[in-house]
Image: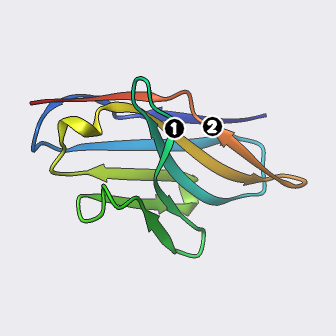
């Protein structure tokens, strides 16, 4: 059984910063692509950023230049540094990871609330 444990959400004023963390725990061989998605009230879940095990990144246009995704492969942890936050970044942020045990399976974290006040 694999779990993704998220932390780091909270309330911040516009222009502020937050750092999210997501650690994969359990029995598995390795983590492949890891990433962050978000879902605002009344909207569909959308991609924020992904990072492959080889170091390739992909960002949503709305966060480019403000958010940075990184990972510690030794700790099976992915981070999302969020700077210059805007009220429109308010959402529940979900971690996603591609986990290899016998085959690759995608797992989701429980979600962490990020609220940006104006």
**Up-down: is 23 above or below 32?**
above
* Residue placed under numbered mark 2 in the picture: 108
Query: What number is the disc on residue 107?
Result: none
Q: Quadrant of the C terminus?
A: top left
Tally of marks: 2
**Up-down: is 24 above or below 91?**
below
Q: Position of residue 85 (x, y in %)?
A: 19, 44
* 31 relative to 72 in the view: left or right: right
* Residue placed under numbered mark 1 in the picture: 45
Foreground pick, 60 / 22: 60
| Alpha carbons under labels 1 and 2: distance apart | 12 Å
Q: Please report the residue visible at 59 percent of the width from the left and 45 percent of the height from the top.
A: 96
Q: Residues within 10 Å of mark 1 (few under 14, many from 20)?
A: some
Q: Please report the residue visible at 53 percent of the width from the left and 42 percent of the height from the top.
A: 95
* Mark 1 or mark 2: whose residue is earlier in sequence: 1
Name, please, the residue furthest toward the right: 102
Foreground pick, 54 / 48: 48
Foreground pick, 75 / 92: 92
Q: Quadrant of the N terminus?
A: top right
Q: Residues within 10 Å of mark 2 (few under 14, many from 20)?
A: some
Tag 1 secondary structure: loop
Foreground pick, 10 / 62: 62
Q: Please report the residue visible at 51 percent of the width from the left and 38 percent of the height from the top.
A: 45
Figure quadrant of residue 33:
bottom right
Q: Position of residue 46 (x, y in %)?
A: 49, 44
* 101 relative to 53 in the view: left or right: right
């Amino acid at each position: 059984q694999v779990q993704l444990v998220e932390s780091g959400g909270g309330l911040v004023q516009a222009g502020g910063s937050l750092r999210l963390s997501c650690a994969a725990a359990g029995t598995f061989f390795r983590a492949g692509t890891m990433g962050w998605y978000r879902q605002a009230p009344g909207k569909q879940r959308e991609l924020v950023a992904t990072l492959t095990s080889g170091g390739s990144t992909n960002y949503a246009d709305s966060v480019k230049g403000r958010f940075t995704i990184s990972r510690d492969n030794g700790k099976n942890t992915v981070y999302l540094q969020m700077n210059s936050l805007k009220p429109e970044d308010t959402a529940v942020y979900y971690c996603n990871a591609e986990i290899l045990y016998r085959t690759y399976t995608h797992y989701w974290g429980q979600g962490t609330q990020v609220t940006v006040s104006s």
